[in-house]
Amino acid sequence: MYELSVPYIHYEHGNINSIPFEQIKLDYLNSAQLIVANSYATSRHIALRFNPSTPINISLNALPANFDKQDSITKTFPSERPFRIGVCGRLVAVKGFAIAIYAIKLLKERGQILNLHIAGTGPQEKYLYNLSSRLGIQDQVIFHGLINPEETNLFYKYLDILIVPSIRESFGKVCIEAQYMGCPVIVSRVDGVPETILEGETGYSIPPTLDIAEYIEMGGTADGLPDLVYSPDEDSLVSPKALNPEHLAEKIMFIMQNPELYEKLSQNAHNTAKERFSHEKHVKELWKLFEEAMKSTRHHP
């Protein structure tokens, strides 16, 4: 479309993070009628890396349409069974799921018995399975495999807490889906993931401090990791880091030791996700942006 001089809108969901700088990419962005980013972090990544002349609009990702039809859900503190911690996504290095396994190991050493439920498939599946076995917690790590989109709400409903230990994540749609189902979430404070929660009200974010070299020494891999990620604290592009499993374990234990806080987090999570990430509101917001872009259509020189 760029070469044919057809007016277009660039809708960015995070792939720009993996694109190396080339003049053609900047020309492409500058020639767009409109740039829409799925998070503030994504908009800043585009601005800092490419600095296009086209204005960048932000429209946060929304819940799937079928989630709006779910009943109001809040969870009660699980006092008579082990906590169910979960991760959900493609099993690749950039998701940082190995960090969650190490955190479960640390909690076991402190007498906290809980289970980690892993939903998804991918190239790291065998590695994660072997890691849990090597750490002696294979009985506490349950692999659910690929879950159909129609069944994800049941997975979140089953969990007590969702963990998103990503090394890079433009937004983190699983965060808002889990919150809608009453799940408090703990996330990496990187890219757009913190934008999915209200800090201390629906979940917590943890700054990643573990160098990738240390992550690799723990058995992780650098395969598929980006060269730069967005730091919301520094408002800059920085080299990627992983969550320290010690910090993750501490935050999990903090929630587990505060039943009243847990139930408040759950209630806030559902109510906030329903209000902030409504599918219907998102569609209206996007359509308004598209209409404005069509009214001011400008053709390429």
Image: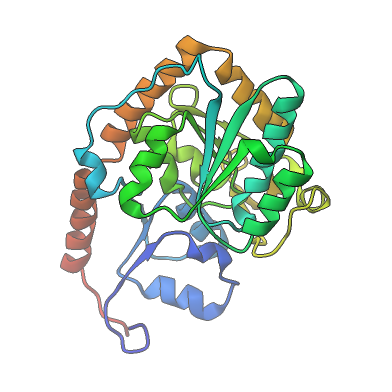
Please state which of residues 185 and 207 is positioned toward the viewer in this rendering. Answer: 185
Residue 17 visible: yes
Vertical arrangement, residue 194 with respect to residue 149, above or below: above
Tell me where residue 278 appears, x and y as whole percent. Answer: 25, 41
Q: Which residue is found at the position 62% from the left and 25% from the top?
A: 251
Residue 208 visible: no
Q: Which residue is found at the position 28% from the left and 49% from the top?
A: 64
> Quick check: 191 left or right of 131?
left
Q: Quadrant of residue 297?
A: bottom left
- Residue situated furthest bottom in the rendering: 4
Q: How is the image coloured?
A: rainbow
Please state which of residues 288 and 210 is positioned toward the viewer in this rendering. Answer: 210
Tell me where residue 34 appears, x and y as whole percent. Answer: 31, 65
> Quick check: 79 left or right of 1?
right
Tell me where residue 14 appears, x and y as whole percent. Answer: 48, 59
Q: Which residue is found at the position 41% from the left and 16% from the top?
A: 264
Quadrant including the N terminus: bottom left
Q: Which residue is found at the position 36% from the left and 83% from the top?
A: 2
Q: Quadrant of residue 69?
A: top left
Please state which of residues 72 and 23 is positioned toward the viewer in this rendering. Answer: 72
- Residue situated furthest front in the rendering: 139
Quadrant including the C terminus: bottom left
